[in-house]
Amino acid sequence: MIEKLTIIGIGLVGGSLARALRAANYVHEVTGHGRSVGNLQLAVELGVIDRVEVSLADAVRHADMIVLALPVGCMGEIFKQLAPVLADQAVVTDVGSVKGSVIEEARAALGKRFAHFVPGHPLAGTEQSGVGSSQADLFRERRVILTPETGTDADAVERVRAMWEAAGAQTQTLSAADHDRILAASSHLPHMLAYCLMDMVVRNDDHRAIIECAAGGFRDTTRIAASDPAMWRDICLANRDALLAVMRQYHADLGALTEAIEKGDGDWLMETFNRAKHARDALNKKL
Ligand code: NAP
């Protein structure tokens, strides 16, 4: 049980975690801190958090668990502000979609308190943003990846693991490098493709006719292009190397596909589409 939980950034993910832990009676008090007081007040009105603290020092005082649920580009500054006001009993974790860059910023800012920082990433979310979209069941039966470093306090890892399990999730441990390489392919690349496709279509002279004729395929492929641009700018820049590697691979594969169509190579198309269809059919059973 968490006595005092402080969430910094009460949006979709931070708000959903607060809701899930409250629904599970796993937390006594939830304090919110963030950027706009209006959105934090909305979180109080919605019953997501108990109180708002405008000062970060007041927000984390006596907290036993502190969760950073902000875009990854804002975390470095928050770690610097947290360092002088962190109490000994506090465990710090985050929900950022990139782990390597967040870990380096935490290491640089937190000093010996870095041992009580447990990096995390819930593999759950939607293209919506803000506390108004938060849901108590967002993490139910979803996976949360923890990427503790050598020297991360084992008890702190256990407390973060227990928190996510109380929220309904299953936890898994990976190295930060493995996390960032795998997520570049499974999440970051698909978002790049969706943004690129949607932007290409909207700049086409025929865009009105294209959108009017769009059906399920277009809707499914572009759904995540409605995700928050600032959040995705930060993810691209924070996971630049791993993302560029899979983007270059995709670019080469798209080149091979273009060439096969140019040459009228139906055998190549059948082989490639069959391989992809079998893989996607198998995935349907898991999703
Ligand atoms: P969100 O709904 O937009 O919430 C972000 C929160 O951060 C808001 O409370 C926002 O404050 C605050 N914030 C934004 N910019 C800030 C700044 N410059 N300084 C201080 N606070 C700032 O986003 P989210 O979807 O919950 O994402 C939060 C984190 O979760 C990100 O690191 C993301 O990578 C990660 N994540 C997202 C998903 C997903 O599917 N969305 C899934 C897994 C992990 P305001 O209320 O003032 O806007």
Image (spheres, grey):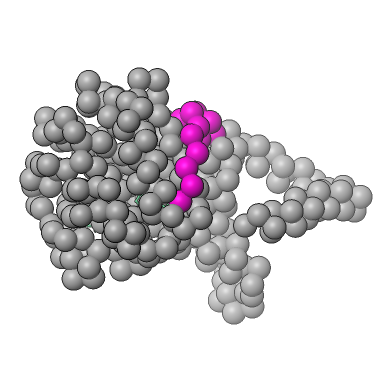
The residue that appears at 58% across and 74% down in the rendered structure is 211
Question: Front-most of 38 and 252?
Answer: 38
Q: Is residue 99 left or right of residue 68?
A: right
The residue that appears at 13% across and 59% down in the rendered structure is 51
Q: Is residue 70 left or right of residue 224?
A: left
Residue 46 percent coordinates (x, y): 23, 70
Residue 239, picture quadrant: top left
For this orientation, the residue located farthest to the right is: 267
- Whether 197 is among the magenta residues is no
Q: Is residue 5 above or below residue 108?
A: below
Question: Front-most of 277 and 251?
Answer: 277
Q: Is residue 4 above or below residue 226?
A: above
Question: Front-most of 192 and 33?
Answer: 33
Residue 234 percent coordinates (x, y): 37, 43
Question: Front-most of 230 and 155?
Answer: 155
Residue 171 is at least partly visible in this image: yes
Q: Is residue 153 above or below residue 23?
A: above
Residue 29, picture quadrant: bottom left
The residue that appears at 70% across and 46% down in the rendered structure is 254
How many marks on residues?
0
Residue 143 percent coordinates (x, y): 50, 48
Residue 86 percent coordinates (x, y): 15, 33
Q: Quadrant of the C terminus?
A: bottom right
Report the magenta residues as a range: 169-181
Residue 42 is at least partly visible in this image: no
The residue that appears at 70% across and 58% down in the rendered structure is 285
- Whether 170 is among the magenta residues is yes
